[in-house]
Amino acid sequence: MTSVVAYDPNEDDDDMIDNNPFARSILENQPSIGETPPQEENESEERRENSHNEAEQEQQVLRDASLDPNDDNQQEEEESFRILPERRPSKYTLLVKIKGMERIGSTSNKKENPTLIMDVQTNLPTFRKQNHKNIRKTPDEFQQLFKYLNGAIQESFIPSVPRSFTNYGINSNEDYEKTIKNFQEWFNRICEDPLILRNEEVAFFIESDFNTYSPINKSKLPATGLKRKTLKQLAPPYDETVELAEFRPLVKSIYWRCQDIDSKLSKVSRSKKILSQEENSFGQGFVNMDDQGQSHLYKKFGKILIAVGDIDSVIATLDIATLHDALEWIVKDSYVVKEALTNRHLIMRELMQAQQILRTRQDQARKLRAKRDINPLKVDEALRHLKTSTMDEQLLTNKLKRVTMNMLIERQTWLEWYENKMSNSIKEYALRKIEYERKKLTLLERIRSDVRRADTNGGLSRLGREGRVSGNDAMTTDIISQSVDGDDWTGEARRRSTSQMDKLAHTEFDKALTIEAGAATFSETQSSSPFDTNETARASESTSLDARSAATMLGLPTF
Amino acid sequence: MDYDEDLSAPVWDELNDHTSSPANEVNSDISKIAASELETVTDDDENTSTNFTGRHETSEYQLGQTSPEEEAKNNYGVQSSSNLLEELAPEREAFSDLNLGTNSNPVSPIKKSGDPLFSGSTYLPLVSGNAEPTVEEEADYTSGTSGQSSSKRKPQRLFNSARVRRRPLLDSTKSVGKSSEEDKISDPLGEFKKENEFQDEPLDDTSSNANNKSLKGDVVDLADGELFKLSPKKHLPSNTEQSSANTQRKTTNEQATTTQDKLVVEFEIEVKDPVKVGELTSMHVEYSVATKSKLLENNFAQVNRRYTDFRWLYRQLQSNHWGTIIPSPPEKQSVGRFKQDFIENRRFQMERMLHKITESPLLQKDPDFLMFLSSPDFSIDSKNREHISGSGASSDSNDLSEIHISDIQLLGPEDAALILKSGGIDTESQKRFMNISFSSPPKYIETDDYFREHWQNAQVLEEQLRQLDKSLEMVDSERNELASVTEEFSKTMESLADLEVTKKNANLLSNFADTQRRIKESLERSSLQESLTLGVTLDEYIRSLASFKAIFNQRARLGQYLVIVEADLMKKESQLEKLHNIFKTKPNSEKVQTAKKEYQILKTRFNNIKKSWQTVGDRIKNEVENYQLEKVHDFRNSIEIFLESAIESQKENIELWETFYQNYL
């Protein structure tokens, strides 16, 4: 607890500064501290007496800097550049463009370990040449790199590697696009971080041969395994950087709740799948009841129900693929962030320990000085100890400063990323939802006239709504509530292009419906929908599961 | 004259009180074992007197018969329905007695209670003559008590038996004399009365003659007057005339009632206020059934009924109207009987059942139905009715399509008793030797393709519908499951929003959660909608299909009986022939007579069964057509409603997402 007392923010700082003859000089000397810690070693014994105060002062300065960043922007910037020289604007860039992906081998390999193909362009000195083409990497290698970076660069939140497959199903076009997109996003995030960029391991990763990369340097986390677990059990040390102090519990909550949402969402999806199966069998029940009459009403109705069930199943898949996958990444990422923040806590703990040791060493030295007969050997030893512990303390202090400063920046970027990711995935989710719910509506409306025609006196007229279907003319054509001009149930103008309309008017299951329902009976319903030709049906089918095109098409400013 | 009778009445009553039950027993025994011997004896003894009394009774019967009919014409709904019933199912007269007895006539209470019974028991010497009203009352009482104790069947049979023969008498007087004599002799008291009566006759010879004329003039007046005061002898000359007139009137009446049948009287029925009644073991739910209708006594009735009572009603109606599809009650269910949803659902289904019954002109006038709607102590009344009609309504199997053919209704009470003694039609023929049967009963094979085909169709359809219903139920439960999971999802979303990572994010997430919740509500609504439209229709379809199958079962069972009895008849015939050959010399020997008698019984039995088998078949054909039309209509209607609601909820869904998308993304 002694260390905590030392950091008490309620302490009267100004007095301390006034009374301390070294305070000013340290402030002045500070720019040199970060870059040339060896200077410290040359300092005289007298100064070492006050090194305790000195350390305190350093903390003080740091705190001041972090607490009111607007106080002196110029100085602040200078300060941050001094501590984080990498953050200085520089000419170094790394551009990675993922060109494609190959899934080969066994099913599990296909799924877990596709090969990503990319082009790299850079001016980083760590690279041997500026342009690399058709570099092939596997997610395993990505994982290795991530693992190394996570240990080596404790200042940053290293983005976690995305999953090597999506829930669209590994054979679909959408999966291909989405996986590439995810990795591209990962690289973009990596390239934005100057600390990572400067790490030579990134160059080693890019320049190593296919499937051979493993980290050349060794990286180490402050604590691992059981030790880490035990340390995590302790109350977090006092943290004067409020943002970061609050950030860890926040990230932790995000982690847990997203995980919770994730599991709930997969539950929803599973339930929807089961529902769609039941809907299928319900529809099948109608198909079995085929009345042999001229209208085949039950059969048609059953077919439609089956198709609706299929659409529900598609929706279930899309739910998972859009929102669940995104959330999963957020979960993974927030875990990394959380652990990085834990690392910071561990560094703080180490620093406290170092300060403790330093204090005892100082006391020892003081005692020695008070003694009349001094054993020069003992003095030498004490001095040596004092020197090393001072150095340790300095190193740690600087490290913590760096980490804190960088994390403050990273925190902002991460939150931005989180927000974007979340809203994008929800957007995608909503769009796909709208698209397929509309298709469902189209399907249901297709059978409407058949049901209507079967019985003029039934159904709606019983509900007193015969006005909905005016006379016999209406029965010959379908009433389609979604048209180019918008939806007939809402006053809002939602204009669509004919291609959009075409997409809505057709589903993946049209073919099944036409084939099985018999061409003769179905042709009338076909002709009733305005955009119907077989070509367009086929065209829509080929692209209908393409998430990107659907999103862009539906995402036009019509909504 | 009047005084005489008034005085004598209680005396007879007392006498009857003591003698009736032993007399009945004697009657049943004698009529069974030694009917033929007694017949010959009585023939000698009271040749003339029986003839007289027989005719006298006939006329009296006719008068008795006319009076309710007249009353029916004076728009007395209940009676008209009972008349209709007499036409359709004459064997079931006992029931109408009871019914009329309960519906007391404001004009002449004594006659009212006695009247129908009187008409039914016309040929019974026991209730003949001046003492009739009192005897009848007494008889009514005994039949009532025996009905409750249910072990004493005999008095009932005594009265019911006569009724069966009412019709044959009208057609041919020959057989009547024989059978009435049979009964007469078994009851010495009856004879005594007759003699008494006979002596009385000359006294009011002229007055009754005048009475007779007035009778022709105004039957209603007559009915209001004291019917039993008429001396039987006075009717003698006009007897044949009257009987023919009577039959004519009957036929016109029949026509009138049939047209009346087509008219559906308006009913307003409400099944409401389910209340849990009873302790642990006897706990059940009672529903109050409130009815408004002209067919009811005060145009309104409210009673408490439980589920088993509805089942009883179904069975009873099924037994009353062979070949008619009876609207079926909900299925039995033992688990979760007291859940709110279930009770409400059951209430709804039972209400629908009653509504459907009232929609049928035939069923809505069924006295059992009216009794069900209005009887204050249903448990006793229902038992009585069940006992009298032999419907076995309370021994109710789970399967709605299983049926019970009432022997009483099929063969008439007397023959039914015989059958019952030997253990039912299906076993009777087998029990010849030491109660062990060596041959399997002959099998009934449906010969009419029409029935076979429809039976098969019904089977297939039921299977399909059951499957459909099951999958709809699954869809429904899955939808509810999905709704609850969505709710959870929405809640966790909400919790993430509560973190307020950023303002914008929190806003988006909470709105997303909100949209999810709305989706969940919409899901629940549509699942409720589905179960209310298609689910209910399907369920009803399936249950009515069971009822539909039941009428085929009825025909098959009757056919089965027919085959058995036919086989028996053949056997008897050959036996009789053999006996004829053996006893060529003395054709009147005891053995031949018995065999002849038995053969006769079997023959009438066979004819009876055949007749009902055919009528049931005809009625089935009629019903099937209506049924299919109606059901297909119902089903398509609910499909359309189902589809429309699906479309609407789909639009709602889209709108929810569109709104969300527009506002927050």
Image (cartoon, coloured by chain):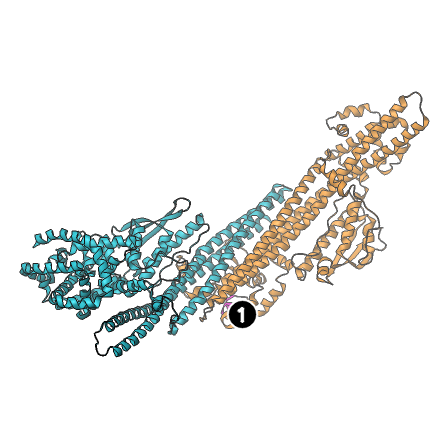
Q: Residue at x 44, y 70 (%)?
A: A293
Q: Quadrant of residue A403?
A: top right
Q: Residue at x 26, y 63 (%)?
A: B414
Q: Residue at x 33, y 64 (%)?
A: B424
* A376 is within the stretch colored magenta: no
The quarter of the picture where the C terminus of chain A appears is bottom right
Q: What secondary structure characterizes most of the magenta part?
A: helix
A173 relative to A479 in the view: left or right:
right
* A525 is within the stretch colored magenta: yes
Residue sitting nearer the eye, B83 or B116: B116
| Looking at the image, residue A363 lies above or below residue A346 | above
Point out residue B601 in the picture as x, y percentages from the top left corner.
26, 69
Give the orange chain's letter.
A
Point out residue A94 in the picture as x, y percentages from the top left corner.
79, 52
The quarter of the picture where the N terminus of chain A appears is top right
Q: Residue furthest top?
A: A372
- The colour applied to the residues of chain B in this rendering is cyan
Mark 1 secondary-structure assignment: helix
Decide: few, some or many residues near mark 1? Use Cα within 10 Å; few <14, some 14-19, many ≥20: few
Would you name the residue on which mark 1 appears? A516
Which residues are drawn in magenta?
A524-529
State which chain disc 1 sits on.
Answer: A
Point out residue A385 in the picture as x, y percentages from the top left corner.
88, 32
Residue sitting nearer the eye, A186 or B194: B194
Q: Amino acid at mark 1?
A: Glu
B624 relative to A419 in the view: left or right:
left
